[in-house]
Image: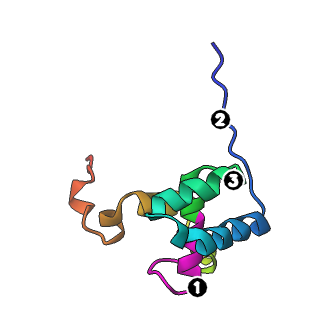
């Protein structure tokens, strides 16, 4: 049996901005963030988790939320080897140097 790779749609920047704008405009119409994400995402034809990620990133980019902006993330990717970047994202303790003792050292 062949394993088929799952298709991940690529959305334009304009489409993402429209989704964030719609969410922000209509958030007050719903009882929770999740309900607003689901309603707006269904109208756009994307998943609610995708829309949530766009909104959170837009808040980071605007300085409304802590975390790396898109520009900072792109700069970091250019500076750091991709494998190191992926590991640092997966294991926050590794970023801080705390998991050094967990690494196996073979003689």
Q: Is residue 105 left or right of residue 61?
A: left
Q: CA distance from mark 3 to mark 1?
A: 25 Å
The percent coordinates of residue 78 (x first, y second) are: 63, 72
User: Which SS class for mark 1?
Assistant: loop
Q: Residues within 10 Å of mark 2 (few under 14, many from 20)?
A: few
Range of residues picked out in magenta: 54-69
Mark with earlier residue (3, 1)? 3
Residue assigned mark 2? 6
Residue 65 painted magenta: yes
Tag nearer the camera, 3 or 2? 3
Residue 79 appearing in the image: no
Closer to us: 66 or 93: 66
Q: CA distance from mark 3 to mark 2?
A: 22 Å
Q: Where 66 sits versus 43, above or below?
A: below
Closer to us: 39 or 78: 39
Q: Where 101 sits versus 29, above or below?
A: above
The percent coordinates of residue 50 (x first, y second) are: 59, 55
Q: Residues within 10 Å of mark 1 (few under 14, many from 20)?
A: few
Q: Mark number for residue 62?
A: 1
User: Which SS class for mark 2?
Assistant: loop
Tag nearer the camera, 3 or 1? 3
Residue assigned mark 3? 43
Mark with earlier residue (3, 2)? 2
Of all residues shown, which one is farthest toward the top? Answer: 1
| Color theme of the render | rainbow
Of all residues shown, which one is farthest toward the front? Answer: 29
Q: Residues within 10 Å of mark 3 (few under 14, many from 20)?
A: few
Mark with earlier residue (1, 2)? 2
């Amino acid at each position: 049996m062949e394993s088929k790779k799952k298709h991940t749609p690529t959305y334009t920047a304009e489409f993402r901005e429209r989704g964030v704008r719609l969410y922000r405009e209509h958030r007050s119409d719903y009882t929770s963030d999740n309900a607003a994400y689901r309603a707006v995402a269904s109208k756009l034809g994307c998943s609610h988790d995708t829309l949530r990620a766009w909104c959170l990133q837009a808040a980071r980019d605007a300085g409304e939320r802590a975390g790396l902006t898109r520009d900072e993330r792109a700069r970091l990717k250019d500076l750091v080897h991709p494998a190191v970047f992926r590991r640092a994202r997966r294991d926050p303790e590794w970023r801080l140097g705390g998991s050094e003792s967990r690494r196996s050292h073979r003689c």
